[in-house]
Image: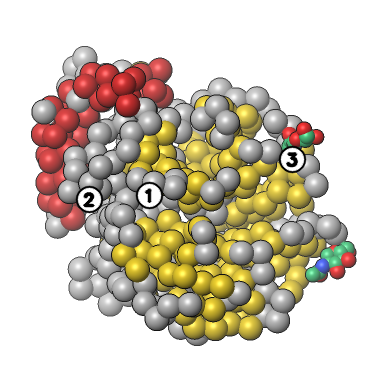
Amino acid sequence: MARTTGKHFSKKFVFFLSFSGLLVAALIADFLWASSSSSSSSSSSAYISTASIWALENSGSSIIPIVENKAHKRGTVKDKKDPVPGRVLSATFADIPAPELQWEKMAAAPVPRLDGAAIQIKNLLYVFAGYGTIDYVHTHVDIYNFTDNTWGGRFDMPKEMAHSHLGMATDGRYIYVVTGQYGPQCRGPTARTFVLDTETKQWWDLPRLPVPRYAPATQLWRGRLHVMGGSKENRHTPGLEHWSLAVKNGKALEKEWRTEIPIPRGGPHRACVVVDDRLFVIGGQEGDFMAKPGSPIFKCSRRHEVVYGDVYMLDDEMKWRILPPMPKPDSHIEFAWVIVNNSIIIMGGTTEKHPVTKKMILVGEVFQFQLDTLKWLVVGKLPYRVKTTLVGFWDGWLYFTSGQRDRGPDDPAPKKVIGEMWRTKLSL
Ligand SMILES: *[C@@H]1O[C@H](CO)[C@@H](O)[C@H](O)[C@H]1NC(C)=O
Ligand SMILES: *[C@@H]1O[C@H](CO)[C@@H](O)[C@H](O)[C@H]1NC(C)=O
């Protein structure tokens, strides 16, 4: 029951915060959030032990268990500024101890990119769109060649294609590009959907998504393009809807998207991966920046966000199962993953905001999810903390480029948008 109340409570506050910019409200809500989730922790951890693999009977209308992240309990801090004496704050914002990796700096991308998208096909990493600055978005594709480690092959995107928060997947030749944000700052989304033939560099239209979404989880699975979650049209409200479209060789085989089982938890910026005929949706967040009401430039303004490390899986039965969560909540990872030797590797991201300063906190770890044991490991440290990395793997090397990095080793808040490319030898 505590769980239900907590969920209900926090939803109300997310709603409330959407319409108020008051820091006071944020602080109160944050306190309530913390207290409501801690009151539910005993019931939810009991739940995990009995039902860590749990099929959702009737997704959408059911209450979703709050899967308590182990990292919540591992470290705690007490800060002098804590308004409630004795309250224990979660330390998920802290770095997790991790092995050092040897990083080699490669040629930087032609432009810096935040919230860009990337797809690897063989030895090429196609890097799309993204913000250059908050007021400028890219409208082209750059290509990195892993064989000779050079950038090149720039070409334009269709004019109507979104510039950030894209859903994207590939079959090895065609790249499907679904919905996303059109324009800079916190402008509205488009439902327009495209396909790129990487051999001819030609773009084609696909049926629009039924409604636009920001950063929906997107993947090709069993001949269908699946799109789920993301944020709704206001950029903030999590969507639970899930659609699919039959596609083959870059063509839609149907005129309309089909409605599929809703995802248990909505929101943008998650990794969506198909391995071994199973579809995984990892991490993400509820809530995001919204356009300031009445702003002619749709100026971004910060709203209440909840970052999570949940892992959901769909298999033959088309029922969602809940798998062990990430070592810490992690968002902005939609193109920050690769599959290597039956593991999913995820690099960087954002985690829960700092409980006292409320600053956004970046992630500097490399995570491994072993698909045979369903265990998470922290396998290394990035050269710095960074979100919305674009990741590839070639010939034993793990690469990342782009995103927004931290202010320095002692300050995990976001600062510079980068185009840097780095690689390290990976040995799992
Ligand atoms: C990638 O680099 C290799 C080695 O220089 C070259 O043979 C190949 O043609 C390049 N691929 C593309 C698509 O440019
Ligand atoms: C993947 O497995 C192969 C075969 O066991 C091994 O040679 C290779 O080093 C592994 N790759 C990584 C990145 O660990």
From the image, state whether disc 1 or disc 3 is nearer to you. 1
Where does label 1 land, which residue? Answer: 318
Residue 292 quadrant: bottom left
Which amino acid type is shown beneath numbered disc 3?
A: Thr
- Binning the other alpha carbons within 10 Å of mark 3 as few (below 14), some (14 to 19) or many (20 upward) gives some
What color scheme is it? secondary structure
Mark pair 1, 2: CA separation: 14 Å
Q: Position of residue 224 (x, y in %)?
A: 48, 65
**Callout 1–callout 2 Cβ contact below 8 Å:** no
Q: Which residue is mark 3?
A: 424
Q: Residues within 10 Å of mark 2 (few under 14, many from 20)?
A: some
- Drawn side of residue 179 relative to residue 248, left or right: left
Towards the viewer: 384 or 267: 267
| 183 over 81 or under it: above or below | below
* Quadrant hosting residue 236: bottom left
Q: Position of residue 424 (x, y in %)?
A: 74, 40
Judge the density around disc 1: few (<14), some (14-19), many (≥20) Cα neighbours within 10 Å.
some
Q: Residue at the spot x=77%, y=38% of the render?
A: 425
Q: Is residue 185 left or right of residue 119?
A: left
In the image, which is nearer the foreground, mark 1 or mark 2?
1
Q: Secondary structure at mark 3?
A: strand
Q: Quadrant of the N terminus?
A: top left
User: Percent x, y for residue 40?
Assistant: 19, 25
Q: CA distance from mark 2 to mark 3?
A: 41 Å
Q: What residue is disc 2 on?
A: 60
- Look at the image and tell me in which quarter the C terminus lies: top right
Instruction: Name the amino acid, label 2.
Output: Gly
